[in-house]
Image: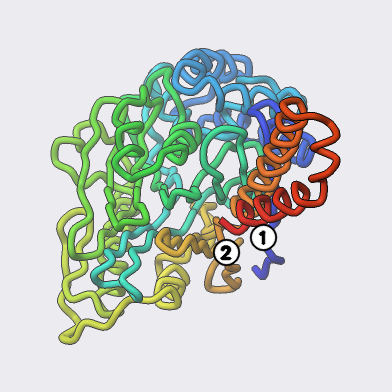
Amino acid sequence: MRRPPIRQLDLAGSPEEMGNAHGRAHAAEIRHYAEHRVDLVAGGLWSGGPLKRGAVLELADACLDAHESFSPRLHAEMLSMAAVAQITPAEAIVVGGFTDFVDTVRAVAGGSHPVSVSEDDCTAFLVPASLAEADAAMLGQTWDMHDTATDHVILARLQPDAGPGVMVFTTVGCLGQIGMNTHGVCVGINNLVGNDGRFGVTWPTVMREMLAQSSATEALDVLLGADLAGAHNYLILDSAGCGFNVEAMPSIRAVQSLGDMPLVHTNHVTNPEARRFEGERDAAMMADSRHRLQLAAELLSGCGADGAVGADGASDNLADDLVPIDVKQLMELTGEPSAICRRPDARYRIETSGAVIMRPRSADLWACWGQPADNDYQHFSVQDRASAKDRDDVQNRASAKDRDDVQNRASAKDRDDVQNRDDIQAGSIHMRAAAIRAD
């Protein structure tokens, strides 16, 4: 399906101001999406057995304390969004953190993971600087979800009153899903099926807090310290080329560092110690995840990476001569039609809802709404909004300093002397303000 350019949302200010603006911009759509996702959980197809709607929301409500403890600012943003959109805080947990929340429901309510459910089928990868064009490491992925989620995709530019600016690929009602900040820290995700869900913090809040950090190592520390509600795989990369792949479950965090070869991850657990916390999946879906892992590694090898490595250690050596991997090749990888770029079928209503490629060294982000095989990527610079804000801040500081300088000099000297030197002082002030702006 051909989609229009991705919708964009600009949010700035305090957590409450950002949440209010988000809720106002998409109130009716957020309510519709939240209702649908609560119904999906209540229906049992994703959560292991049917539940009454009230029981679903009671379980979601029990996760709120963990969110507030983990990040009071992000919790305030989520609550403000919910209030303006006229959904409950519990519904906000479900609409944003759905795939973690169903792990919680299965574990707490005693349900098993229905083998008929594929959950999402994202394919993600990290490309090291040594194999990338212009020696600039990249992170990319598809975002696959139930096909009814695709209509709700947006790209949000965030400028909080504290911390770095952030750009996130997400859906309405959700704090963020995939993104990069103005420090050059990137975070991507794959869903995993966990059997150890708990009343914890869901992944959108975790990834946003990770994007408040200034390096991949700091973002990793945030993830390692989070009281997680469910299982996801996180990919982390910064502008220096430092990267990690983390299979993160409530009971374990299996960390793999980015080395000299690309890392690929799909939707199954690859770390032997983490496998005991993986929920049962349909055999065909498990085979599909393994196939996509191998296929993506092969495609990266064909791009020029001599020995691309899957997160399970699978590797290929298809290229004799190393050719730098570029953004166009990664776009083509996400649009691979046989397995990676997914279309819904009668049994599994899962599709590729979009894709993102990020190059933190240059602050470049490319986003696609819908299947990359059918839709174009759009280019964005994560520095654009921050640069404008920085210029305004410098100008405001210069103007305030000029006023203070004039007042201080006027109070210290005779008014007649100040009058005699008006022209000289004015010229000096303008020159100093211009110098500050130039810096």
Q: Nearer the viewer, residue 86 or 285?
A: 86
Residue under pointer 2: 368
Look at 54% across and 52% down and name the residue there: 349
Residue under pointer 1: 6
Residue 109 vs 323, above or below: the answer is above
Q: Residue furthest bottom?
A: 321
**Crowdedness near tag 1: few (<14), some (14–19) or many (≥20) residues, C-alpha within 10 Å:** some
Label 1: state its secondary structure: loop
Q: Answer with mark 1 or mark 2, whichever residue precedes in sequence.
A: 1
Residue 292 placement, left or right of 408: left
Give the colour scheme of this rendering. Answer: rainbow
**Crowdedness near tag 2: few (<14), some (14–19) or many (≥20) residues, C-alpha within 10 Å:** many
- Can the viewer see residue 102? yes
Q: Are marks 1 and 2 in contact (CB under 8 Å)?
A: yes
* Mark 1 and mark 2: Cα distance apart in space: 7 Å
Residue type, numbered disc 1: Ile
Residue type, numbered disc 2: Cys
Look at 33% across and 54% down and name the residue there: 266
Residue 391 placement, left or right of 340: right
Residue 206 vs 166, above or below: the answer is above
Q: Nearer the viewer, residue 379 or 334?
A: 379
Residue 60 placement, left or right of 408: left
Residue 205 vs 336, above or below: the answer is above
Label 2: state its secondary structure: strand
Residue 100 locus on image (x, y percent):
44, 32
Number of marks drawn: 2
Look at 84% across and 31% down and name the residue there: 415
Please tell me in which quadrant of the rendered image residue 312 appears.
Answer: bottom left
Residue 217 placement, left or right of 14: left
**On-image quarter of the C terminus:** bottom right
